[in-house]
Structure formats: C-alpha cells, structure tokens
Image (cartoon, rainbow, N blue to C red):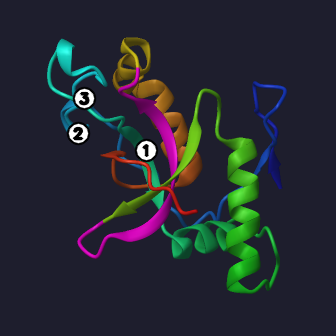
Amino acid sequence: MVDNSSSRNNQVAIPMSNPQHTPLPPLTLASMPDPPPLRNRDPRKGDIVKTQFLGFVMSFEELAQWGKDHNLVPGGEYYRLRDEAWDTLRMTVPHPTATATARYGKDRMYGSSFVVATNRTQEELERAKNLEFIEQVRTILGKKEPPIWHRRVRTW
C-alpha cells in the first residue's frame, strides 16, 4: 500500500510502514537540543562559529531496516535495502531539508543526516523551533529521538 498524502509535486509517496510500529511521542521545545550561535566567519564580528546542522542521523543499519519495514526490496539484501531507503527518503522528506554525512555517537560512526535546520542564517536557525515541520520529518524517518546538532563531514 502507498500513502498518497504527499502535498508537494516533487515528493514521492512513501510506502506504508510495518504496522507493528507504535506511534511516536510528540517532540517539545524542551526535548530539542539547544541551538548553537549564528554562524560567524569574521573574527572582527566576534568569536568564529562554524556551520552546524540540526538533523536526524541514520546509520546504515537504520536505513536498511527502514527499507525492510517499508518493503522496498522484498527479500532484498542489506546493501540494496539501504540504498533504496536512501533514494526513497531523499525524494520523500519534505522541503526544505538537505542531506549531509555526519559522525555521531561515542564511537564517532559515519551516518546519513536529514537536515532540518542550520545556523547559517537567522531564518535557517529559526527552523529549529518549527516543531510541526521537524515532527513531520521525524515521523517519515521513524526516529524515536529528537534531531541532533552536528558538523558536516566531507568524505572525499
């Protein structure tokens, strides 16, 4: 089955999730991480503040599980499930989002992040308070925890 409730023309419909998943508790501003200061690259204007991203980081395993839960590749192997999930999610998650590679957790593992806000401009920083939008992205991804602030990692 396919959910055809997409409101944007460039989005694809997301396959229905495994019905065994329970609804997620709603996010609150108190559950969100504190935002960093606005980015500043000019030392004459104050301390240097590097660009940070507020995003939902998904490990390769989580992407593969998402692909399996949404039956993207019936009986598919791990790598095909992961790749199909990544391709599907990039077309499904609503605008304005971006993707980035992030290192996260105590072991500093690599993961793929669906970015919902940044500290590059005041407007982008304000998106970190838009719980309705963040909740929409979180629901699509099936993440239980709130997004985290992280730096982008260049992998090339």
Image quarter hosting the N terminus? bottom right
Pointers 3 and 2 in contact (CB under 8 A)? no
Amino acid at circle 2: Pro
Residue 93 position by quadrant: top right
Gap in Å between the C-alphas at discs 3 and 1? 15 Å
In front of the other: 125 or 138: 125
Residue 76, which numbered label?
none
Give the prevailing secondary structure in the magenta stretch: strand
Query: Can you identify the residue that label 3 sits on?
Result: 29
Q: Position of residue 101 (x, y in %)?
A: 51, 56
Q: In the structure shown, which secondary structural element does the residue marked by tag 2 occupy?
A: loop
Q: Is residue 114 magenta?
A: yes
Question: Measuring 31% from the left and 25% from the top, which residue is drawn there?
Answer: 41
Q: Residues within 10 Å of mark 3 (few under 14, many from 20)?
A: few
Magenta residues (range): 105-120
Q: In the structure shown, which secondary structural element does the residue marked by tag 3 occupy?
A: helix
Residue 42 position by quadrant: top left
Give the left or right position of residue 23, taking residue 27 as reference. right
Q: Nearer the viewer, mark 3 or mark 2?
A: 2
Give the left or right position of residue 142, taking residue 91 as reference. left
Query: Can you identify the residue that label 2 sits on?
Result: 33
Q: Nearer the viewer, mark 3 or mark 1?
A: 1
Query: Can you identify the residue that label 1 sits on?
Result: 55
Q: Position of residue 110 (x, y in %)?
A: 45, 68
Image quarter hosting the C terminus? bottom right
Residue 43 position by quadrant: top left
Q: Is residue 102 above or below residue 28?
A: below
Q: Earlier in the sequence, mark 3 or mark 1?
A: 3
Which residue is the extreme one toward the front? 44
Q: Is residue 118 magenta?
A: yes
